Amino acid sequence: MRLRTLTAENFGPYYGTQRIEFSRDRGVWIVYGRNGRGKTTLLNAFRYALYGKIMGRKAEREPRELANRAHHSQNSVAEFKTVLEFEHDGREYKLTRRFSDVDDPKHVTVLEREGTPLPDSHAVRELSRIAPESLSQFFLFDGELLRQYEDLRDADVDSGRRMREEVDRLLGVRALENAISDLAELHRGVTREKAKQLQGEKKATNLATALHEASDIRDRLFESKRSLSDELAAKERRLREVEEALGRHEAAQHILGQLDEARAQLTSLEISQNGAREALKELAEDVWRVALEPRLRERLGEISRDLDMAKERRAEAIVHRRTRLHLESNDSCPVCERPMDTPTRESVLQRADSQADADQIDRVVAGLQRRLEVLQGVRDATQTQLLAERERTLRQIDLRVEEQREDIEELENRLQGIDETEVRKRQRERDQLKELIGQLRRDIEATQQQIEAQDVAIGRINDQLSQLKVSVDPALQRKDVMLGQLHELFNAALTAYQDSLLERVEEEASKLFTEVRSEPDYAHLRIRDGYGLTIVDDRGDEVIGHSAGYEHLIALSLIAALQRCSPVQGPIVMDSPFGRLDEEHTRQVVAALPQVADQVVLLAFEGEFDRDAAVDALGSSLAEEYVLDRVSSEHTRIRTRED
Amino acid sequence: MTDGNGLHEITERLRAEEFPGVDKQLVDDLLNAHVELQEDRPQARKLTEQIVNRWIARHVPTVGVDTGEDQ
């Protein structure tokens, strides 16, 4: 496909009729525009023109939203039109799409080939042949879409699996698989017919019956597989619809996720809160003791001091009692054992007698100790510290519960106007669909194995029949042989093509990558099953953890490689695809654009790259530069840079 | 694809080497139909049958065989 012109009429900010011309079969067209001028809308104009769809950030947008506001207010009707002129296989086409919210139907599509409008059904077929919508992401994309290519490396991610299927479709692998499937089906019909004819042949009757039965079994298996495949396709379609619908509520989903988490945390906090309350309650009957604590502490101190003093006095009393007992029966000093004169002895005895009796002091000490133990017991029972700790814990939990409730309230306020039940219903449906799709895939695989086993059996019977040299309708016989050979040929081609593809995509992607990368030791890209690409350095090691900018380069390299390796080729329209690239890489990617596809339309904001350097690097490949000029907030004008 | 490793090139190489009795035009027609009708399976099936039947109708009268091994 080669673009000729794109005309947008009252499409978004493109008030009135605006037109871009693609005067050459090869080249790079750059459209410059500041933010808000309508670059993304221009990408959508291409998308609407080709596929009749308009995409928002994550999901399809309502066409009404894209009607020019000035035109709408002047004419009281939301309407717009796109006209895409292009050439394909040497024929000129003009594709007109019109939307009007007052007409019925709201959308009208007219495809003209060589100036003649095609009937609707024919036009749909022709368009799906020339520009299959399922491959749109390889031709129309922005920086955001490029990130999805990273999913190719992850075999378990749904989006990665879908992307791999789409790459297979782009590269023609699916075309071969479909051809094999259709030829096999035709061959089965021929086998059945042949079995019917052979049943009339005496010597072949038994084998013909066996062939007939084997064909029946195989047919039933095939029908079962087809029915499962249809169901799978329907579920996958539904999953895409549900995901698209959820995409429109992405913000709501995010809030719901936060809300679920916040509610779960609140539940957990409330459990902790109840636990803390119970723990505090266990100590609650001792709370009165807390009031006594300061007096208790003071009294305990006094008693301890009295006790210490009493103990000292008791020790002294014991010494005096021993002294008295010694002096009552001895004249010597109880300490040094030297003789003691009478006056000294009398004096010592008198002093010993004047001291309190040790037994009395013992009673005082015992009394004090009892009081001390009682008060100490009271103090221990209050567990003041534990009580304070539990009170503090409860206060903290109460605070967190309060904060969590406020967060939940705020999230619930943000959800106002959004049908939470509906979003949750769709989320549940999405999860159920994913599970069902997994099961269907397993069932299809199992049925396919049974079909293959039956094919082997049919092949054996056919071999035996061919040795009998019985006659059947020559046309049928010829068809049988031809279909068998075609089936074998296409199977062999599929294997050979798939084997060569990975190598070829790796080689083509590496070619572009080595031109745009700035790290000289990043030697090339390596492909894995499923088209995931990784960087390999000059020592042959895979580079792990490279930058987001390099992910971007890998994605661009893959797109270029897919374009070169695909039997379906066309122009590429990219909207600000340099999001994660630094200045140097951006310059190198711009210079390499002519290698990405024959026609490349680059939508860029002013200053996204050095224009002078780009003009020099692109040289004669630069076909035209357009500028999006602001006339008003409702009117952007497309003009060539020279105008 | 210009290096002989495209879908058509690989299929043609295999046809010429391993299935020389299979008509090149028949293979091309089938392959083109499936590349172009990837998104329209019913139409692709119908066209496959038509291509094969037309080819048989054109070629069988000149073949005139009564058993399977005519290649």
Image (cartoon, coloured by chain):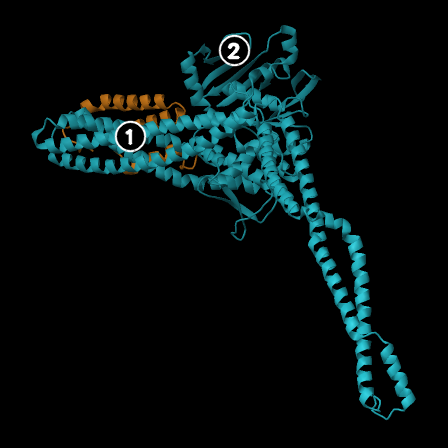
Residue displayed at 65% across by 36% down: A404
Above or below residue A45? Residue A226 is: below
Circle 1 Cα neighbour tier, 10 Å, few/some/many (<14 / 14–19 / ≥20): some
Is residue A570 visible in the rendered image? The answer is no
Q: Which mark is residue A222?
A: 1
Above or below residue A318? Residue A510 is: above
Q: x, y percentage for residue A34?
A: 68, 25
Q: Secondary structure at mark 2?
A: loop
Residue displayed at 50% across by 23% down: A2
N-terminal of the pair, mark 1 or mark 2, is: 2
The quarter of the picture where residue A17 lies is top right
Tell which of A564 and A207 is nearer to you: A207
The quarter of the picture where residue A12 lies is top right
Q: Chain of mark 1?
A: A
Please indicate whether residue A124 sits to the left or right of residue A590 in the image: left
The picture's colour for chain B is orange
Image quarter where the C terminus of chain A lies is: top right
Q: Secondary structure at mark 1?
A: helix
User: Mark 1 to mark 2: distance in Å?
Assistant: 41 Å
Circle 2 Cα neighbour tier, 10 Å, few/some/many (<14 / 14–19 / ≥20): few
Above or below residue A48? Residue A622 is: below
Give the letter of the cyan chain: A
Q: Amino acid at mark 1?
A: Phe
Please indicate whether residue A138 sits to the left or right of residue A418 in the image: left
Is residue B36 visible in the rendered image? The answer is yes
Tell which of B53 and A23 is nearer to you: B53
Residue displayed at 88% across by 83% down: A348
Please give the residue where the numbered disc 2 appears in the rendered image.
Answer: A106
Q: Amino acid at mark 2?
A: Lys
Please indicate whether residue A1 sits to the left or right of residue A466 in the image: right
Q: x, y percentage for residue A89?
A: 44, 22
